[in-house]
Image: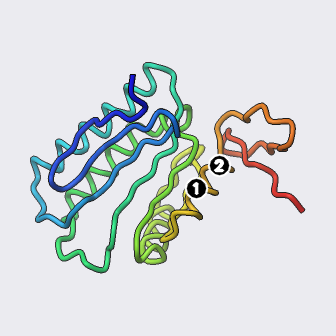
Amino acid sequence: MTDIRVIKDTMGYSIILDNSKKLFVVTLKIDVEYNEDGFEEFLLYFKNTWEYIKTNNLMYHLLVNLGSSNKKENELPLGAYMKLIHVMTGINDIFIEHCHSVGILTEGSIKWKNAYELATKLWKPAKQRPLLFTENEDEMKTFFKSHKLIPIEDMEQVWIPCEDGGYVRKRSE
C-alpha cells in the first residue's frame, strides 16, 4: 500500500491523504472561475474523506494550500461560502475527534487570519482545533509537530492538555 492516496485530482484542486505524515492535503492548483457543480463536488469529496477518516478511526492534520492569493481573480460568491460553512459545521464533530490541527498555507495569510477572526466572533465551533495561517512551510511543519489530539509517547517531550481536548507540546525554555 502506498503512503499517498490521491482522493481527487482536478485541474483546479487536489485532495490527498499522506498516510506517512498523517496529512490531509487540499491544494488549490490554479485560479479557475467559480463553477457551482465543481464546488459542490469538491465539498462532497472533502466531507466524504473526513467520513472515511472517522470510520477508520484515523487522525490527520489538515493542510490547506491556497497558493498565491495575490494572483487570484476569481472569488467565491457568498452562496459558496455559505455551503462551505454548512459542510464545516456538519463535520465539526469529526474534527474534534480526528483532526490534530489545521494549517492554511497562503500568501496574504494575515488577510485570511483577520477574516477568520471576524467570522469566529459571530460563531465559534465547540472544541475548535488549533489553526495556523502562514506563508511559511517550515512554520507549518513545526506547528503540526507541536499540536496533537493524543500525546505521542515521547519521554523527551512534555505535552500539555488544551481546552479543545487535544495536547500541545511544551516549549523548551
Residue 169 appears left or right of 71: right
- Residue 111 at x, y percent in the picture: 43, 77
Considering every residue shown, the one lying at the far front of the view is: 2
Q: What amino acid is found at the position of numbered circle 1 in the picture?
A: Lys
Residue at (23, 39) in percent of width and height = 8
Q: Is residue 38 above or below residue 99?
A: below
Q: Quadrant of residue 50?
A: top left
Give x and y (percent) for residue 24: 42, 42
Q: Is residue 76 above or below residue 131?
A: below
Give the residue displayed 80% in from the left and 45% down from the top.
160
The spot of residue 3 in percent (x, y) is 43, 31
> Quadrant of the image for the N terminus?
top left
User: Where does the C terminus fall, quadrant-wise?
Assistant: bottom right
Say which element carries label 1. Answer: helix
Judged from the image, the secondary structure of the residue bearing numbered disc 2 is helix
Q: Amino acid at mark 2?
A: Lys
- Asked if residue 58 lies left or right of residue 43, the reply is right
Please provide percent x and percent y for residue 104: 45, 60
Q: Which residue is mark 2?
A: 145
Q: Which residue is mark 1?
A: 141
Residue 172 position (above or below residue 112): above
Q: Residue furthest bottom?
A: 70
Front residue of 40 and 133: 133
Q: Residue at x 55, y 56 (%)?
A: 131
Instruction: Say which of 117 and 1 sits in front.
Output: 1
Q: Are marks 2 and 1 in contact (CB under 8 Å)?
A: yes
Q: Residue at x 27, y 48 (%)?
A: 14
